[in-house]
Amino acid sequence: MTIKTGVPLLLSGNEAVAYGAIAAGARFYGGYPITPSTEIAEVMAEELPRIGGKFIQMEDEIASLGAVIGASLTGVKSFTATSGPGFSLMQEHIGFAAMAEVPCVIVDVMRGGPSTGLPTKTSQADVMQAKYGSHGDYPSIAIVPSSVMECYTLTIKAFNLAEKYRVPVIILSDEVVGHMREKVVLPDPSEVEVIDRAKPTVPPEWYQHYEDTITGVSPMASFGEGYRFHVTGLTHDVSGFPTERSDEVSALLQKFKNKEIHNTKDLTMVEEFWTEDAQVCIVAYGSVGRSARQAVKLLRARGVRAGMLRPQIVWPFPKLPVESVLEQVSHVLVPEMNVGQIRKEVERLSRTGRGKVHGLNVLDPTFISPEQIVDRVMAMSPEFRLTGEQSSGRTEPAVEDPSRSQVAAR
Amino acid sequence: MVEQNLLSKTPAVHKWLRVKKKFPHLWCPGCGNGIILGATILALDDLGYDKNDVVMVSGIGCAGRIPVYVDCNTLHTTHGRALTFATGIKLAKPHLKVMVFMGDGDALAIGGNHFIHAARRNIDLTAVVINNNIYGMTGGQASPTTPHSMRATTAVYGNLEQPFDTCELARSAGATFVARSTVYHVRHAEQMIRQALQHNGFSVVEIVSNCHTSYGRINRLGGAIEMIKYMRDKSVMYTPDFDPEKAKADGKQYVLGVLHSDTERSELCELYDQLAIAGGNGNR
C-alpha cells in the first residue's frame, strides 16, 4: 500500500474512501468524473496501477457500473463512485447486480438535486433513491459515514458486506464529508478485517451459481475458473438459467429479501451518544450527525437531557434501536438536508405512548448548524423552554466518561 | 465431401453447446441466429480455445440469447450495455477471450455510445453485431439499421430516418478489425469470426441476418428462404480493387469480407500492463 499507516495524516473524506477501498482489497475501479466525488477516481487512477489493480474511466455511469460488475464476476473486488446525477444512471445496473448477486460497492457523494442541481453544495436527498432507486424488489444496503475516519472504516465495511452477502452496497457520503479534511491515523493492514466472498468447494459439474444454502448466500465461482456458469438479469433458477416457474420465481425474490430479514443484527450499526437518560433524541446521520453531536452538548448545557442516535447503516433501517429510543424519550427530532426522507421512516415506528417525531428539514444549501438543531428542539415543547430558563449549568448524563460514545449493534 | 466435413464437426457441436440443458432453443424456425451460433462454435473449436477461457457476453433481444446455449462462461446483461461488462471482464482478466453478441438495436441504438467508445479504446473484444434491420423480439419496431422507407410496427408508413452502416461506424470510431458477412455465407461468416477472434484489438463482425417473422412479413420480403436468397444475390466480396460505384450499379447491397484491419495500434490491456510496470517502479 502506498499510504502510511500508524501516523497522523490529513485526509479528505473522498481520499479516505479510496484508501479504505484499497485496504478492503478493491483492485478494480470503473468510473465517470462528477463533482463532488471525482477525488476518489483520481486517487484510484494513481494508486491502482502500482498495486496490480485496474482503473478505467468509462463513457458514462451506466458503463462504469457495467464494467465494475464484469470485473467482479472475474473475482476482483470492484467499485465505482459518483454523485446524484450519475447515481440515477447507475440504478439500472444496481438492479442487475442485485438480481445476478454480484458483489460491488457504489459510492454516492450526495449533492443538491434534483437533476443537475447544486454540484458543489451538500445534500442528503438521495437516501430514498439508495433504497428504492432501481425497479423491482431487491435488497438494499446503504452505509452513511459522518467523518473522514468513518469514510475509511465504513468503506471497508461496505466491501465486507458486499462480499459476504453477494449484493451491491451503497456508501452514501455527501459533499461535506467528502471534501472535509480531518486528522486520521490509519490502522495497519494486519488489523483490518477483510471478508472475501465464499468460493465453491464442489467440483464444476456439481456447481450451481445460485445454490440454496442455509446462510441464504450462494458460494460464488469466478469466470475463467472452470465452472462455466451462466449469469443473467432475467429471473433465473438456482443454476442461473432463465425461468418463469412460479415456485422458482418466488423463491428467488424471497432469497433477496431474506438477505435483509435474516441478517438484521449484522446489518444494524448505530452510534448512540448520551441516550441513556435522554428525554429528547436527535436521530441524525452522515454529516448532519456532526452538528447533532454538538447540539446535544449545547442542549445539555441548557439543562435539556438530549441524546443522539446516529445510524451508520441506514438501509436496512435500524428498526430496533430507533424503536428503543422512541419508547424512552418524549420527543425525537430528525434533522436532515432533504424534505424528511428518514423522518418518515421514524414516523412509521411511532405509536401512541412513544416519543413524538419532529423534523428539521433544511433545503437551503448551507449546512445544518448545531444552533439550528438547538432552536428547533427548544421550540418543540414548552417543557424544554422551561428547563432551559431554569438551568444555568452543564448537565451531563450519569456516566463515568461523558465523552464516551457507545457504538452499539443491537 | 461437404457432408463429410459437417459430420466431422458434430463432436465440436456437442463439446461447445449446453446440449442437454438448454435445447430446444427459443428462436423462430428459419432464424439466422442458429447459423451464427454454429459458425461461432466452429470458429472457437478450430482455434483450439479452452472453454474455460472463453467468455460470451450479450445484451437484450434475440441475439442476446446466443450465449446461454454455449458451454463456456456466459453473461446475459442489460439492453445495450454488454460491451461495458465485457470491458470490465477483459481489463480485469486479460487472458480471457471475450466475445460480445449484440443485435442492431442493442449495439447501435441503446448501446451506440458504448459501441463507439469500446472501438475508440481498442480493447481486445470480439463484437458480433447481428443485423436483421429490426427489433425482432419485441415484435418488429424500427431499429437504427431499418433502411429508409421500409416498414416496421413503429414506422407504419415507412421509415423516415436513415440507417447506420455498422461497419463504417465501427471503423470511424477506431475499431481495428471490421468485417461483414451474412447468414447465407455460412463458412465465410465462420472465417470472419475466426479472424476477428485472432485479431488483437477491438474487432467488429457484422452478420446480416433475417427476421422473416417481424421484418420480412411486414415488408412482404417472403420467408426465411427468400430473405436468405436475397442476401446471396445482393452481396459482393470486398477485394483490394473493390469498386463501390460498380457494386452500386450492379445493385449490390452488402459488401462482405474484411473491410478494415489495423495491426499497428496498441491494444488497451497491453498498454495498461506497460503502465502498471512503470507505475510499480514509481518513486513514491
Image (tube, rainbow, N blue to C red):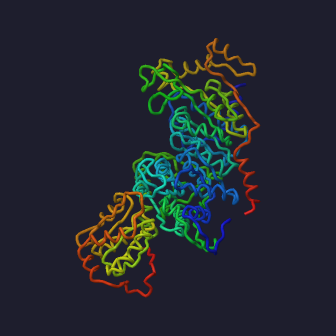
Question: Against A235, is B25 above or below?
Answer: above
Q: Position of residue A61 (x, y in %)?
A: 53, 48
Residue shown at 55%/61% (left/top)? Answer: A14
Residue shown at 35%/69% (left/top)? Answer: A373
Quadrant for residue A17, please give it. Answer: bottom right
Residue shown at 34%/85% (left/top)? Answer: A393
Quadrant for residue A197, please give it. Answer: bottom right
Question: Against B132, is B245 above or below?
Answer: above
Nearest the viewer among A14 and A166 is: A14
Quadrant position of the N terminus of chain A in the picture: bottom right
Q: Position of residue A2 (x, y in %)?
A: 68, 65
Left or right placement of residue A92 versus residue A3 in this view = left
Q: Position of residue B250 (x, y in %)?
A: 64, 12
Quadrant position of the C terminus of chain A in the picture: bottom left
Question: Against A55, is A394 above or below?
Answer: below
Nearest the viewer among B93 and A14 is: A14
| Residue B18 in view (yes/no) | no
| Residue B114 in view (yes/no) | yes
Left or right placement of residue B98 versus residue A288 in this view = right
Residue shown at 55%/20% (left/top)? Answer: B227
